[in-house]
Amino acid sequence: MKQKTEDDPSRRNIPSPFLVLLLGFFMLVAFVTTAIEDELPRPIKEQEIGINDSNTFSEESANKYLQIILGDHPRVFGLEYHYIKTRDLKELFDSIAQKSILPIHTDWQFVDGYFMFGSPSVYRNLSNVVAVLEGESGFYSNGTIGTSILVNCHHDSVPFAIGASDDGLFCAAMVETLEKLSRRTTKLKHNIIFLSNGAEEMGLQGSHGFLSHPWSKGAIAVVNLDAAGMNGRPNLFQVTDSRVLEAFRRTTSRPMAQSLGEFLFSNRIIPSDTDFRIWRDFGDIMGVDIAFVQWGHIYHTRNDRPELINDGVMQNAGNMLLPLVRDLADYEGLVNRVPRSTAVYFDYMGWFLITFTRSAALAVDIIVVLLGFTTVAYPIWLFGLTPLYWLPYVIASVTAAHLFDFWRSKKTDLDSSMRTIQAMAATRFILSVLLFVLCCFPIFFNVRYLIGTPLFLMSVGSIVSMSVVRYSKVNAWQHLLLEVIVHIPATLFTLSLGTRLLALMIPITGRSASDSPDVLVTIASVAVTVYVVFTVSGIELLFSRKWMWIVLSGISVVCIIIMFIPMNPYRDVNTTQRHTWFHSQVTTYDQNFTVLNSSSGVILAKTDANNIHDALKAIRNSDIYIRDDESHESDNPLNKLQIRETDLRILQEECQDYLYCNLPIFGPRSYTNSLFVSMGPPAHFDHSIQLLNRSCTADVCKLSFEIHGTAHNTITIWPRENITLIDWPFKNSIRSTFRMQGRPVYNIRQNTNTYSAVFPPYELTLDFRVPEMKQADIILDISLNAHKINHPEDFTDHYKQLLEVMPEYMNIATFLSFRSNYVF
Ligand SMILES: [Zn+2]
């Protein structure tokens, strides 16, 4: 071992200010990574495509379909506009079927049904639009069809959103795929079912409804298409049939797929759901789930508009979809069932896809662990390390590393180059141990690649760099360059994943209703930084310690200055603050249907960290706000809304004392920390629960109700003490949502999914076990929560005045909601 001193010019360290340059370089690499991943193909015009070309997707043509599908209003199921657009979509399918060379069968399905989604989810008159491109497997005389590939999108939207990305874009891509494949002259092996389901938002009922369709019986694989964002390239993030994943790999030139997504989704870290769950859990139809995930701040807001979709996004989606569907439809082996996929899959910067089976992944990960340890042993063999030197790099930051290195270098004769090699070996040691530990926990099988892949790339890189350093004389500059270059494959991988993960997490934490989403973002940022820095951790030792503190302090000062520049998170016109409001009236009746009490006002649900604070501020700064010592009631000729401080309250105690705070619920959710503004009731619509029959035999009482509501109702059943619900119209076992005051609470979601001028009443029969001495008393509390959604024409004057004082950056989705509490 040669001893070098810092005075030897060939070994002199790199001056510390160049560290800034290095940081700049990595930031540039991060930018380039994102740019590469976001690269989109050139949109293809219809006239560029030959009349017989069944393989080329046209963005221009798909965008025309998108306009037809979207129209210019939200398409909330149960509303008239939703019905009109469903009809337009059916006509679109029919017009393609008429011109098609191969037979295309279309249907507008109407269906009633229910399923257990936590609690019963009931749908009536639900409509789906279907087109089937006939394949060799064909149609049967009994109405069912042969083996088929199911492609699913949904054409409904959330209230107050056009839903251009969610999910109009994929529906349009699906129509264009159908149109192109209809030009084929030879049949594919399987039929292809193109399903545009009419009710995905708010309960996934549309896809469940399709399972009652005779055509669904032929489905042997599914490609589910949805969105949780806008733009970029869609990500494949759930797989239940690995052969469909393989087809995706074969046919997609720029794949984006991470089984990390599956881990986050199945462990509810991403609190969302898609129809894929229905296919898997209720239909036993396996396949893949694909969604747009960028621009999460647009998702489910008024800005989910077609104008904001970038050129090339549709083309890219189609370039993915058309060949995938065609490949699957010609894939003979799909008829045989295979065990549910446990595939591990990930793309490398969207360039190519790597897939392993679960057992292969374990073997690969163990090999990587061994390789990692080998590359740790290599420098020991080369330079004779003391293993204790490694451990402090667990928390390797430049400062810590240098402080430690300063102390250590007094006791060692190694130069900075060798100390760098030791430090990098330390990192690989830690990663190898971590990966080994993860191998012992099967639950992590599909996320171990997050460590395994960079560790593998770092190990290969380090063998190269250590050999070069050993056999040739490199100075600090050369060594730095060498390490950066040999580790770039690992750095690109971690940067690519890190930037994607942050882009995904930030909008999700933003709409989490947490008071401090920034804490979560900080934790995520630190984790991502550590993850990325791992790949080159150690190279900081090649820099001179001289003036290092100035450089580091300088960078810190810049960070602190940026930190304190005030920024409004809603400054961008496309970034809105999410609001969900319920203009509501709550009426409680006694046994004789006499009104015991009634209150009305607006619930502003807490939906993000600032929305309640900002709404309060807007009210208090507006002219509708009347200070308590003022009195304007006498001179209010224009029926002006007046809000006093006493009309404003943050919901707290009532939520503990009353079932659902005694407020109308949509999906069962907590209103704690939400704002209630007392004001006049919403525009009236008919809603009621009537008792049709009540009879008791022995200790069983049967009660039948007729419920008059709207398209969107939630019924809450709360039996009194010592009374048990023993039967209801649902085959599944009786399951309560939760217990309150020791009594189980049951919820039934009941929708009428397709518009009609009058919604027929819903009949509900419940059986209770009631002790005979209690049979004359009250058996249960039952509440009807009836909602009108997306009905601006029903806003009262006062409600409009309240909406008007809110700043432009708020995205307010509003419901007209009645809750009626009855006892029977
Ligand atoms: Zn969706």
Image (spheres, helix red, strand yellow):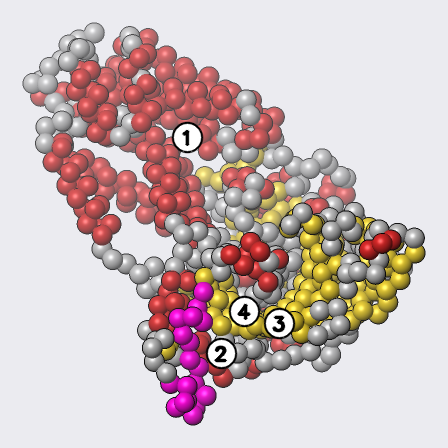
Give how far apart the Cα atoms at labels 2 and 3 are: 22 Å
Q: Residue 465: image x %, image y %?
A: 30, 22
Residue that carries the numbered disc 1 in the rendered image: 454
- Going by the numbered disc 2, the residue's amino acid type is Tyr
Along the line of sight, the residue nearer the viewer: 527 or 466 = 527
Tell me if mark 1 has few (under 14), some (14-19) or many (20+) residues whose alpha carbon lies within 10 angstroms of its own.
many
Residue that carries the numbered disc 2 in the rendered image: 799
Q: Residue at x 28, y 58 (%)?
A: 567
- Going by the numbered disc 3, the residue's amino acid type is Asn
Residue that carries the numbered disc 3 in the rendered image: 597
Residue 635 is inside the magenta segment: yes
Among numbered discs 2 and 3, the one appearing first in the sequence:
3
Give how far apart the Cα atoms at labels 1 and 3 are: 64 Å
Q: Residue at x 60, y 58 (%)?
A: 658
Among numbered discs 1 and 3, the one appearing first in the sequence:
1
- Going by the numbered disc 1, the residue's amino acid type is Pro
Figure check: 415 above or below 518: above
Give how far apart the Cα atoms at labels 2 and 1 are: 56 Å
